Amino acid sequence: MAEDIDLVKGVADAAQDVVNATLSQQPQEMPRNLDFLLDVQLQVSVEVGRTRMLIQDLLQLGQGSVIELTKLAGEPLDIFINDKLIARGEAVIVNEKFGVRITDIISQQERVEALG
């Protein structure tokens, strides 16, 4: 069981390295030895903002309630891959759906500093 968890973590770390390399290179420059990782699925999420609430306030929410978030309107959205911040972007509409345009890639040094 512990070996399986370590294996999954190793694959996730390797995938993160591939994503970082991919974001910093043009597609035609991608090394051929990474082809086997190209079909690994990663969880991508975008965070609009956060807040903290008391349970009693949460229970009072209903349709039409507004939850105030910590970010200001117009601030960049945080883009996470496998729960790790990798970029920031802005909301866009593509074919009547929401999307995110990447405006800034987090540097490797910033990612290391975020670890603590």
Image (tube, grey):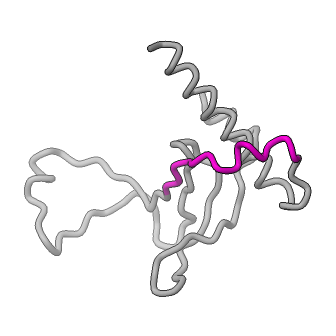
Q: Image check: 4 left or right of 68?
A: right
Q: Image check: 48 left or right of 22?
A: left
| Residue 68 percent across, percent down from the top left | 31, 63
Counting labels gives 0
Magenta-colored stretch includes residue 43: yes
Q: Image check: 65 left or right of 81?
A: left
At x 85%, y 41%, the residue is 33
Quadrant into which the N terminus falls: top left
Query: Which segment is the magenta one?
Result: 32-45
At x 9%, y 53%, the residue is 59
At x 55%, y 56%, the residue is 78
| Residue 34 percent across, percent down from the top left | 80, 43
Q: Quadrant of residue 113?
A: top right
Identity of the residue furthest to the right in this view: 29
Quadrant into which the C terminus falls: top right
Q: Quadrant of residue 15?
A: top right
Identity of the residue furthest to the front in this view: 36
| Residue 25 percent across, percent down from the top left | 85, 55
